[in-house]
Image (cartoon, rainbow, N blue to C red):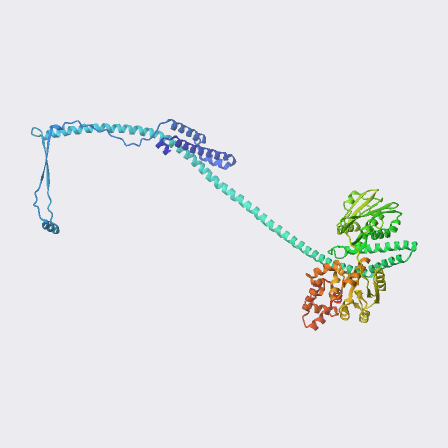
Amino acid sequence: MKKYVATEDSKYLKSYFESLNKIGGNLENISHYENKYPKLKNIIVSQKNDSLEIKKLKSLIDSTYQYSAKSNFKIDNRVPKLKKYNLDYNFDKFDVETKTYSDTLKKKGLFGRIGDAISGKENVRKENTVITIKQGKTPNSANIKSEFDSIMNVVNNHYSGEVKKIQVNVTNNQNNQGKFYEMFSNLLLYSNGLMNIYGVAIKDSKADLEKEYEKQNSRNNRVRMYLLFGSMVLMFIVSILIMILTRIAFIYERKLSKANKQIKENLNFKNRILGILSHELRSPLKIIGIFINKINKKTDDKNIKEYLKSISFTNNTLLIQANQILEYTKNQQVENKLIPVEFNLKNEIKSILTSIEPYIETRNNTFIVEENIDAKIVVNSDNTKINQLFMNILGNANKFTENGEIKVVTRAKTINKSVVSLVTEISDTGTGISKSDLEKIFEPYYQGVLSEDVENLGAGLGLSLCKEIAALYSGEISVSSEENKGTTVTFSINLNLKKMSEIEKHTFKILLADDHSLIRQGVLFLLDDLDESFETFQVSNLKQILEKISQIKIDLAIIDAHFPDGNSISILAEIKKISPETKILIFTGIDEDSNALKYIKAGANGFLSKMSEEEEIKKAILKMLHEGEYISATTQALLLNSMRNPKLINPLMVLSERELQIAKMYAMGNGNLEIVNLLEIKQNTVSTIKKRIFEKLEIDNIVELIELIKENDQ
């Protein structure tokens, strides 16, 4: 407002009234809260009279603004000026004369002035001025005084008039300013009165609101405290539950661990039983097959040949089923692989189809074969798995077909100079397979919705195994079917061609060492099929082996792994010592993966499973005779792995010197106390070492330890 009064700039006046309007608006907003807060309304009503209202304040602001806008008021800060008096007096009638008189001083020399200066003596020249007024006549003082009084009266009257004019102007300005400031003073007083009333009301309301806030805050604090306490109780309960559940989990984990250990022991026991079956059951079945083939070649009786076909089919079926079970119950991490042998493809397929024909006829089915394979094709592949393919697919077709027709169409298709593809289609007129079952037909153990209607259904592994076998040959297999019309299975496998080479004939001395005479006789039949000249010797225990090696220069010793008087691995070094040129082929029913390297390390030149096919056995014997060794694909892989893992050769190699010493003492029948006394160590130490031995060797009992020591300690 001061700036407006000084400059009369309307923007300052506008700004001033905008501030007043804002104050009025704020007061009006406060009035709105009176309905929400009755206490605030009561305080305001009790402190203001009727004249002090917001509407009156607004009206006063508007009137003041209009007066200010219409008035041309401005404070005159200029200093009043007096009009100068023009004195019109004739001074020429006076003749003024002025004369100046100076004292005369004697001028002194240089030394005189220096002396006056030292003594402080100073000579000053004096001057006098004389003013003389002349009037033609003798001056009269009374006339002069009268003249000057007249002049002074005229000047005084002039300036008195000027001062009165200034006083009138000042009075007028004061009246205008008084009215202006009176209006603003009224506005200011009125607004201050309202502000005081609302200030007191707001202050009291603020105090009440603060009390209400404290009360509400106290209530909220109690709620928060209860919530916090409840949360703590809940967390405590949850913690208790977690502890209980954790304890239950640990209990179940211990039970699961115990159950897993029991399962592992059971699996180990199962594998041990299967190993025994492999040695005691499958080997004789294999030899029976050899006998059947031998008899079939020696007889011309058609009836006998027909009987031999049925016997051969039954024998082969048992062997195939046993092989399938072993492949799924042995170590699942062992890779399924082909074991190639040389065979005539046409003869092999013809033999397979001929052997299964009697089985198909048992359900009064017609068996039709269309074969187009060159009789000169000789391949180097796994004939056992080819046999499994045909047996599984034809077996399934016969199960689901009765009084119908089963047809086999097979042909050999040359891919290139070294590969031939065997393409086969096997169809039947049986019950067929639903579309939903076709999607899962290759899953292990899947048997479909017709399972309840079929006898001797099996385990549901056949087609799953067929798919794996086809993949091993880089081939394909597919199934198409329609319910109540039949099923067609089509597969193709790729086989490597092999040229037959002539073998130089030579007479060899061969030692057959096995405690089963049937096994020895079977090997003799296989030797008769070879185009070689042999002289054979037979023994049934370890002692006879050493005696015969000492008496005769043996070219090839075919020796079993286990004999009634011990393990043949214990005499291999002695055989090499007696006859270094003798080649040793271990021919056994024990697992090749876990035993081949041990025997080769002990001195054997080859390792062959009794479950190998006839062609593979013949191949192994010929390689031993002409090349001095036989290393199967499985053993080759084991040799490569053994460079990184010595445990594959001898599991005992993972034990320290002290652990091996204590392991041997356990194998000899010593208990913990006996070992403690013999070695003079603490019983806790023995128990710790025993636990470490079992962990390293991955065994669970002393019986397994004794077997490992027996098989591997030399």
Is residue 612 visible to us here?
no
Judge left or right: residue 202 versus residue 235. left
Could you tell me how many numbered marks the image carries?
0
**Residue 537: % across, % down:** 84, 67
Q: Nearer the viewer, residue 585 or 62?
A: 585
Q: Quadrant of residue 704?
A: bottom right
Judge left or right: residue 302 versus residue 614. right
**Residue 664: % across, % down:** 72, 69
**Residue 148: % across, % down:** 14, 30
Judge left or right: residue 288 versus residue 47. right
**Residue 14: % across, % down:** 41, 31
Is residue 209 visible to us here?
yes
Q: Quadrant of residue 702?
A: bottom right
Q: Nearer the viewer, residue 593 or 219?
A: 593
Judge left or right: residue 241 versus residue 707. left
Q: Quadrant of residue 480?
A: top right
Position of the N terminus, as image quadrant, is: top left
Q: Nearer the viewer, residue 613 or 238?
A: 613
Position of the C terminus, as image quadrant, is: bottom right
Q: Nearer the viewer, residue 578 or 392?
A: 578
